[in-house]
Image (spheres, helix red, strand yellow):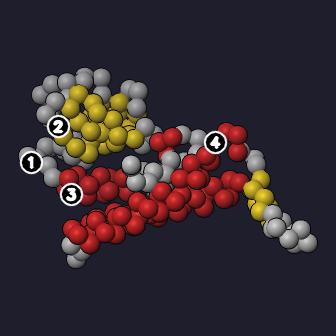
Amino acid sequence: MSEQTLLGVGSRVKHPAYGDGVVIRLHAVAYDICFSLYGIKLVGKDYDKMEIVEAIPAEDPVSFSAAEKSLIKILRTYLDGMEEVPIGDRWEGGTLILQPADKSLKAKELPIEDFFHKIVMTRDRLRVLEQRINSNAQLSDAEKVNLQQYITKIYGSLTTFNVLFRYKEHYFTGEKS
């Protein structure tokens, strides 16, 4: 990447360590780049070991809303559906057993991977709901914030299941204290 190239939001890049990514925000001397496996990383504009896959001209100023819309479009186009989220190694091949308190009733057993898949699908659908709320032109900012608070609380309720994820960057996170 040459020093002369100024990438805009939505530009696709290939980083030697982080792999494929998309520029989601511009700073004075760096980019916020969302990498499919490593999340958002700050990369200096003068970093010359990154390959430009598709350059989109930088617009000034870049609004968060424009960046978010660009990122959503790019992720839908290039990541081909849902992100692959691996289950923790210790749970692979395991079984979830739901045992009723009444011992005369039969326990329910299911592969833990099936349960984990349902948790990941729930998380992905919450993210889509978040995106639709944030991009909905008919909702006021106050209504968006109100709905977002409920989603954040749902994420907080689901933190119990973080033990199943292999990587912390996939964890549910609720309200920060």
Which amino acid type corresponds to the residue marked 2 in the rendered image? His
Which amino acid type corresponds to the residue marked 4 in the rendered image? Gly
Q: Which mark is residue 88?
A: 4
Relative to residue 154, is residue 9 drawn left or right? left
**In the rendered image, which residue does mark 2 sit on?**
27
Residue 101, compared with residue 169, is above or below; it is below
Q: Residue at x 24, y 24 (%)?
A: 47
Residue 54 seen anywhere in this rendered image of the structure: no
Q: CA distance from mark 4 to mark 1?
A: 42 Å
Q: Point out the tag, 2 or 1, that comes first from the N-terminus.
A: 2
Q: Point out the tag, 3 or 4, that comes first from the N-terminus.
A: 3
**In the rendered image, which residue does mark 1 sit on?**
61
| Residue nearest the viewer, comparing 68 with 98 | 98
- The secondary element bearing badge 3 is classed as helix
Q: Point out the tag, 2 or 4, that comes first from the N-terminus.
A: 2
Q: Residue at x 49, y 51 (%)?
A: 172
Q: Residue 21: x percent and y percent? A: 35, 40
Residue 134, compared with residue 84, is above or below; it is below
Q: Which mark is residue 45?
A: none
| Residue nearest the viewer, comparing 71 with 102 | 102
Residue furthest to the bottom: 138
Which amino acid type corresponds to the residue marked 3 in the rendered image? Ser
Crowding around mark 2 (Cα neighbors within 10 Å: few <14, some 14 to 19, many 20+) is few
Quarter of the image containing the N terminus?
A: top left
Q: Point out the tag, 3 or 2, that comes first from the N-terminus.
A: 2
Crowding around mark 1 (Cα neighbors within 10 Å: few <14, some 14 to 19, many 20+) is few
Which amino acid type corresponds to the residue marked 1 in the rendered image? Pro
Relative to residue 4, is residue 76 drawn left or right? right
Q: Residue at x 43, y 37 (%)?
A: 38
